Image (cartoon, grey):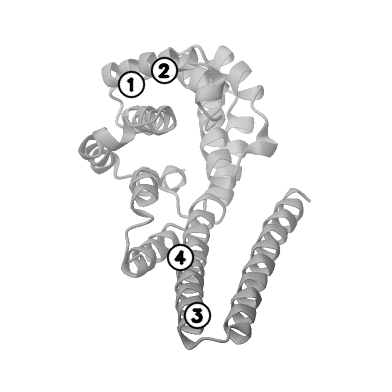
Amino acid sequence: MKNLVWKSIYFGKKIFLWVIYLLFAIYIYYLVTSSQELGSKLIFGCLGGIVLIIVILFEYLKSIYEKMIYALTVDCDLNKAAALKETLQKKDLFNGFKQSIIIFDSLLLLDEGNYKRCLNHLDNNQKFFHSTLDYLFIYYHTQLYCYSFLKDEENLNNCLKNLFKLKNVKKKQMRGLFSWNEIAGMNYFHQNRNIKCLSELELIDKNRLNNRELTYLLHLKGQCLLKLNETSEGYRLLKEAKALGNTLAIVQRI
């Protein structure tokens, strides 16, 4: 039901945009055909044609980008996501999606289990990730998971400190990219306070999560339950995460 609603909204927006583009094309056609002078026809025709070509190219690239994001966050298909990224990079002649790909690469490397490469990627693009609070949030959140899987407790704790500093920033300056309950839960997990971890994770609204995010949440909850010797429920959640996570590295070792 949730997917049906989101798909309806998505296709509704697409149809509305293409109606606007069609009306613009009709208007340009009207200007060209109604103009008496050849110079006016050429000006209206050329300018209108250039605008339409740019708009159509952008919409084409945007559709590839959206498929790429869907492949990673919903299908959890890393090979498909990586292939779509390569296609986007080849066809994005003006590097309009360059910044989006920098963020995407950090998520892809994390999901592939290339944690050290992911940290290097974040470090190499540190200036970009520090340019806005949202990007900085993604930067520390991605680092958090990398250090967690690498069992680097010192850097992980530094990451958590930096994330909790961002929590005090006015909400209008940041979008709700990740759940603070998830971050608090991760903090408790690494302190071995597993009951507190589960309490925080229970507060997360699962309806707002995509399949990728839900996989990470289920994996963390499953690991928590195993530490509490609740093996039956723990393995059930890990099995659910494995089915949902498809090719994500996090579920390959379950």
Report if the CB atoms under discs 2 and 1 are less than 8 Å apart.
Answer: yes
Q: Which mark is residue 156?
A: 1
Mark 4 residue crowding within 10 angstroms, few (<14) / some (14–19) / many (20+): some
Report, in whole angstroms, how far the alpha carbon at label 4 lies from the one at label 1: 36 Å
Q: Residue at x 29, y 31 (%)?
A: 150
Residue 173 relative to residue 110: left or right:
right
Q: Residue at x 55, y 31 (%)?
A: 222
Q: Decide: is 47 above or below 142.
A: below
Q: Specify which label sits upstream in the sequence, 2 or 1.
A: 1
- Residue tagged by mark 3? 40
Question: Is disc 4 placed on a helix, strand or loop?
Answer: helix
Discs 4/1, front = 4
Report, in whole angstroms, how far the alpha carbon at label 4 lies from the one at label 2: 41 Å
Can residue 227 be spotted in the picture? Answer: no
Mark 2 residue crowding within 10 angstroms, few (<14) / some (14–19) / many (20+): some
- Residue tagged by mark 4? 61
Discs 4/2, front = 4
